[in-house]
Amino acid sequence: MVNVDVKGCASFIEPAKYDAYVNKALDAFDVLESEKGAGNDFLGWKHLPSEVPASILADIEGICRLWKEKGVDLVIAIGIGGSYLGAKCVIEALSHNFAKQLSHKDAPEVVFAGNNLSEEYLAELMDLAAERNVACIVISKSGTTTEPAVAFRIVKQFIEERYGKADAARRIVAITDAKKGALKTLSTQEGYKTFVVPDNVGGRFSVLTPVGLMPIAAAGLDIKALLKGAEKAEKALAVKSAQNPAVVYAAMRNLLFAEYGKSTEILVNYNPKLTFVAEWWKQLYGESEGKDGTGIYPASVNNTADLHSMGQFIQQGTRIMFETVLHVEKAQRSVVIGPDQQNLDQLNFLAGKHVEHCNHMAELGTRLAHIDGGVPQMAVSIETLDAEHLGALLYFFEFACGVSAYTLGVNPFNQPGVEAYKKNMFALLEKPGYEEATQALRARL
């Protein structure tokens, strides 16, 4: 269901070196499949597609029915990093581009909070909540991560004041640790329905756990089809082969980085619905590979729009990049360009053609131009942008990330660097226990 085309890299590499990196990637594949490599206690995502219990899906569907009966039309999903990006990318990819503007809505609107500390954002979120029928999904393993904890305190107070504590308990779902932590304690006290953040699944790999599935289902999307596509990818990618798409992708990106100095990978899409897939991908690869003084920097562009902004740099700027194009073979809607008698816009040569045909030609023309400009090209393709194919794409990127990071020589499943800013932030906010750090940091300001 996911294909990887590396022909656009052929003019930049030596075949013997590519073969060597395929062998490296196959060795990394063995490490991942053996489940004995660094970070092996965070491999629960590998078999999620085929092992999500039917009872969890039934519970999620039950909550969605309850909220529908209550007339809920706004669900606030609170989380940060992997606790929101996976759900956000699926909802954006599978929803109507103008769902917010359409008068007919089949499911609640899902909005996100707890991924920033902007006072204006939270104030304006509460302006929206004041006009809507609200429920909340809060996602935090500990319940004390600053950004989501601040947002949940505010949203929880709003829901309790409007609906009362008893009804609030039916409008709040917590996705948290199975046994411990502030959010688990609160959920037990208040009687919230809870789902578990699995101990063996890191946040950036959690889209196929309740972390992602609950908000996606709340938005009215088909989580069973999403899991079906991911399960197909799980089975296909488990086959060791030099043609395995995950091996091909991992081998080529590591070759371009290590041997040819291509230190930035740009994920390119030609469909605005894929914008947040790229944001999810950036966290997945940036947090998994960016450590120990190494890693490929993940960036993204949205074409054709960015061809009129970033296109100049990509075409002729610093030659440190390669591109991976997300290619969707078939559009799900049809718009044909009609003729015009005056032809003032000089577009009659396109009369009778589908807009998506023009989009594909723009994609192909850009890829060829960028090759000529010194930018190697890969393409990751799916047949169409529906739940099943998107599930396969997400699993592909997760599996390929494990293979690629092991090829690079780093632990794909830790993120020691993210704690540095938190310590400074806590000190500057004068959190109890950080008094010495507070004084030291203020002396530097």
Image (spheres, rainbow, N blue to C red):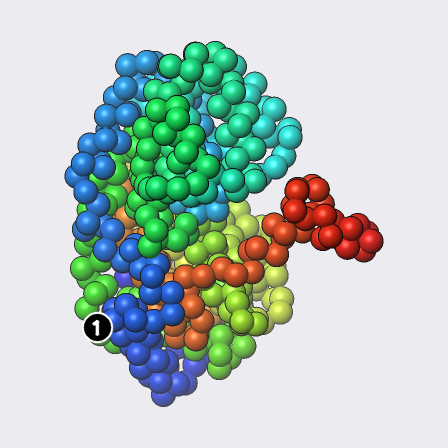
Q: Which residue is mark 1?
A: 240
| Left or right: 161 in relation to 232 | right
Residue pictured at 52% horizontal, 57% vertical: 299
Where's the N terminus, which quadrant?
bottom left
**Where is residue 32 drawn, in percent x and y?**
30, 69
In the rendered image, the vertical position of residue 415 relative to residue 10, given as above or below = above
Which residue appears farthest toward the front when viewing the image?
433
**Hey, which quadrant is residue 43 in on the image?**
bottom left
Residue pictured at 41% horizontal, 58% vertical: 325
Q: Is residue 276 visible?
A: no
Q: Residues within 10 Å of mark 1 (few under 14, many from 20)?
A: some
Residue type at the position of mark 1:
Lys
In the rendered image, the vertical position of residue 424 relative to residue 185, given as above or below = below
**Where is residue 237 drawn, in percent x and y?**
23, 63
Residue pictured at 32% horizontal, 13% vertical: 70
Q: Secondary structure at mark 1?
A: loop
**Where is residue 375 drawn, in percent x and y?**
51, 69
**Hey, which quadrant is residue 311 in on the image?**
bottom right
Query: As rendered, which of 244 and 288 lies closer to the eye?
Result: 288
